[in-house]
Amino acid sequence: MFRSPLPGDSCQFLETVHAMRFHLNRRWAWVSKSCLLLGLVMLAFVILERSVSTFHGSVDDTRTTRTSERQFSDREETAEDLAQPVYKRSSPDPNLPGEWGKAAHLQLTEEEKKRVEDSIEKYAINIYLSDRISLHRHIKDNRMHECGTKTFNYRKLPTTSVVIAFYNEAWSTLLRTIHSVLETSPAVLLKEIILVDDYSDKVYLKNQLEVYISPLERVRLIRTNKREGLVRARLIGATFATGEVLTFLDCHCECVSGWLEPLLERIGENETAIVCPVIDTIDWNSFEYYMQTGEPMIGGFDWRLTFQWHSVPERERQRRKSRIDPIRSPTMAGGLFAVSKRYFEYLGTYDMGMEVWGGENLELSFRVWQCGGTLEIHPCSHVGHVFPKKAPYARPNFIQNTARAAEVWMDEYKEHFYKRNPPARKENYGDISERKLLRERLKCKNFDWYLKNIFSDLHVPEDRPGWHGAIRSMGISSECLDYNSPDHNPVGAQLSLFGCHGQGGNQFFEYTSDKEIRFNSVTELCAEVPEHQTHVGMKYCPKDKASIPRNILWEFKDDGTIYHHHSGLCLSSYRTSDGRPDVQMKACDATDKNQLWKFER
Ligand SMILES: *[C@@H]1O[C@H](CO)[C@@H](O)[C@H](O)[C@H]1NC(C)=O
Ligand SMILES: [Mn+2]
C-alpha cells in the first residue's frame, strides 16, 4: 500500500493502490506540482485559467495523437475483439439469485428476516439480499433492438476514466458496481476506475477493500482525509484521471453491456456534449433490474428547483433522425454522466463552493447549456441504479447549493425559486464571485435564453404582486391552504388546510391572470371542483396557450371570497367531525368568515 508517490507533497488525501500500475504522465506531473487539492478552489481556478486559454474548437489534433498512443496489438483485430471487456464474465447461471436482473427471492428463517430488516434500516437498501447476489451477475439486454446492431469504430473512440465516489457504501453494492464496469467496458476504452473514498468510517472499507481491489486491473483507490462531499470528492478523483473522457458513476450501479460506447462515441463527435446514460431502476428490496425499454424520460425541474423527470417533447422527437439518436435534456439527474475531461475543465468543472450534495446537477445543467454545450441522454447507454428506500443521509446543503446555482445562472428568474423557498433567502451561500466571473469569461447566455430554447415546456409563473404565496383562512386563522402531492400520483390528493408555516412548499399557490389557482411543485397543477362534488381536487393544468377548461376558473372577489365559476360555489373552511380543519365548496355567503381568504404578503 502506498501513500501518494510524489515526493514532498502535503496533499490532503491518501493514494492506496499500487501506483506502479500507472504511468506518471505529464498531466499527473503537472497536477502533482500544483500540490493537488491543497487549496481546492485555487486549483480549480488554475485548471480553469489553463483550459480557458487552450480550449478552442477543434479537438481533432489532440485526439488523433492520443489515440495513436494507444496500443492496438494487431491492426487486423475485429470490432468484436476490440469490444472485449477488461474482465470476461463466466457463463450465466440461471439458478443463482438475481441472475439476468431478475428479482431475487430467498427462503428465509425468522432470524434471517430480522437481518434483512436490520440491513434496510441501516442502508435503506436490502443489503442482506445484495450480499447473496453474485457480484458478477448478468443483466438481460432489453434495450431497443437497434442498439444491439449498432457498430462502433473502436480505434477512434476516446478513452475514459470512470470516477466513483462513495461514502460508507455497503460492500456488495460497491463491489458489484466495480465488477460491473470492468466486465462491461471494452478494455481498449477503459483507462481506469478511480474510486474516491470520501472519508468513510466503515471498517470493511479500509484494509479489506484495499486487499480486495489490489489484484484488480485498472482499479485505483483514493481517500480523502476529511469529509469533502460528493462534489469535491469527484473532482479529486478527476484530477487523477488519465482518460480523455471522465465518466462519473454512483457507487451502487450496474452497467448494461454496451453502455459505454454510445457515450464515448457522442463525445468523440462533439466534445461539448455532456452525455448521460438512461438510468434504470434497481429495486432496493428485490434487486430486480427494471430496464426502460422504450423512449427514456428526460430531466427537468420545478420552481422549487427540485429535479423532475418528464417525457420527450414532440419538437425534440422530430429533430432526431432515429429513436436511438441522443436526446437533448434540459437537466441531468446527477450522478451518472460522461464528459470530455478537457471540456469539463474549460466549463469550470463543478462549483467547489457546494457542500456534500444536492443542487450540483442543476448547476452543471444550466451551465453547460448556457455556455454553449449540450446535455443529452443516449437511449442505448443503460446503467442501473439502486434508488434507496429513502435518502441514506440527509441533504442539508440542498438549499444552500441550489441558492448558489440560482444566484449565478438564473438572473431575475431566481425570484420564482426564492418565493417558493423562503428559507433560501436567508441562506448564506458563500462567495460566488468566481462563478460569476466564469460566466462572464465563457460568454454564457442568460437564463431567459435557456428557458425559451432549451426548456420551453416549462411554465414560467407570473407571480403577480399580491397574488401568490400562502392563502390564509380568515375563519380558522391559524390555517392555510395546503396541498400534499402524493409521490407517484401528483393529482391523487385533495386541497386541504394545514397550520400556516411560511415556508412556501405545499402552501405556495399562485392566482394567475387566466384565473387559475396553480400549485407548481413537481408539476403544474390547477385547483378544480370535480363535477357534482364539494371537495377541491387538483388536475394537470392545460399547456400554455391551450384553452382553459371552465372548472379550473376561480374568482378572488373584493369581499374576500373565492368563487368557483362552474359550480357557482365558494371555497369554505370548516372542521371535520373529529375537529380537523379542512375545506369544502359551499353556497356563497360573504358574511361567513369561513368563506374569507387572504394571500399572505
Ligand atoms: C458541437 O455542439 C455545439 C453545441 O450544440 C455546436 O454549436 C457545435 O457546432 C458542434 N460542433 C460540431 C463539430 O459539430
Ligand atoms: Mn445513488
Image (cartoon, helix red, strand yellow):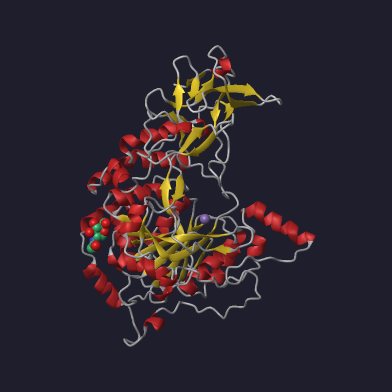
Counting the numbered discs, the total is: 0
Examine the rendered structure and indicate whether residue 503 appears above or below residue 21: above
Residue at x-position 37% and y-position 57%: 36
Foreground: 265 or 512?
Answer: 512
Q: Within the image, what quadrant is residue 338 found in? A: bottom left
Residue at x-position 54% and y-position 41%: 491
Examine the rendered structure and indicate whether residue 216 appears above or below residue 567: below
Left or right, 338 with respect to 288, comes to: left
Left or right, 562 with respect to 270, comes to: right
| Residue 11 visible within the image | no
Examine the rendered structure and indicate whether residue 490 appears above or below residue 23: above
Q: Within the image, what quadrant is residue 119 found in? A: bottom right
Foreground: 253 or 579?
Answer: 579
Left or right, 315 with respect to 334, comes to: left
| Residue 80 visible within the image | yes
Furthest toward the right, the residue is: 110
Instruction: From the top left corner, tell me how far across and down residue 156 is, in percent.
Output: 30, 74
Instruction: From the top left corner, tell me how far across and down residue 315 is, in percent.
Output: 33, 53
Q: Where is the C terminus found, in terms of image quarters?
A: top left
Instruction: From the top left corner, tell me how far across and down residue 173 is, in percent.
Output: 57, 63
Instruction: From the top left corner, tell me how far across and down residue 284 is, in percent.
Output: 60, 57
